Amino acid sequence: MKKKLSILVVYLFLFAPECVEAQCAMCRAVLESEENTAAAEAVNNGIVYLMAIPYVLVAVLFFVVYKKMKS
């Protein structure tokens, strides 16, 4: 039963984008009403930075573990 529930949850998150679509209402309103694209580019850059930092931290962690295991 637990396995079926976990498969259903994974299915909902991966294959039902309308269920997981979310955006801050204020951010969306500002970006849709903005005439120039500077604000949209700034928000997109912020998203990229927030996305990249966890990957860099995990890469550094794996590198440290690799060095420890090798020596």
Image (cartoon, rainbow, N blue to C red):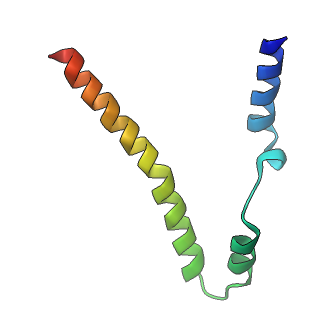
Tell me the residue at 70%/80% (across/down). 30
Residue 15 vertical placement versus 19 (above, below): above
Q: In screen coordinates, is 51 left or right of 68?
A: right
Q: Quadrant of the C terminus?
A: top left
Residue 44 lies in what quarter of the image? bottom right
Eyeballing the image, is 52 above or below 45?
above
Residue at the spot x=52%, y=73% of the render? 42
Which quarter of the figure has residue 69?
top left
- Image label count: 0
In the picture, the quarter occupied by the N terminus is top right
The outermost residue toward the left is: 71
Residue 43: percent from left, percent from top? 56, 70
Q: Residue furthest bottom?
A: 35
Q: Is residue 13 left or right of residue 49?
A: right
Q: Indicate whether 6 appears above or below 14.
A: above
Q: Where does residue 17 sit, x and y in percent of width and height?
A: 79, 45
Q: Residue furthest top?
A: 1
Residue 3 vertical position relative to residue 20 in the rendered view, above or below:
above
Quadrant position of residue 6? top right
Q: Is 56 in front, or is 38?
A: 56
Residue drawn 68% across and 85% down?
Answer: 34
Query: Residue 61, image x and y in percent?
Result: 33, 33
Residue 26: x and y in percent read 73, 74
Task: Name the residue rendered at 78%, 13% in the picture.
Answer: 3
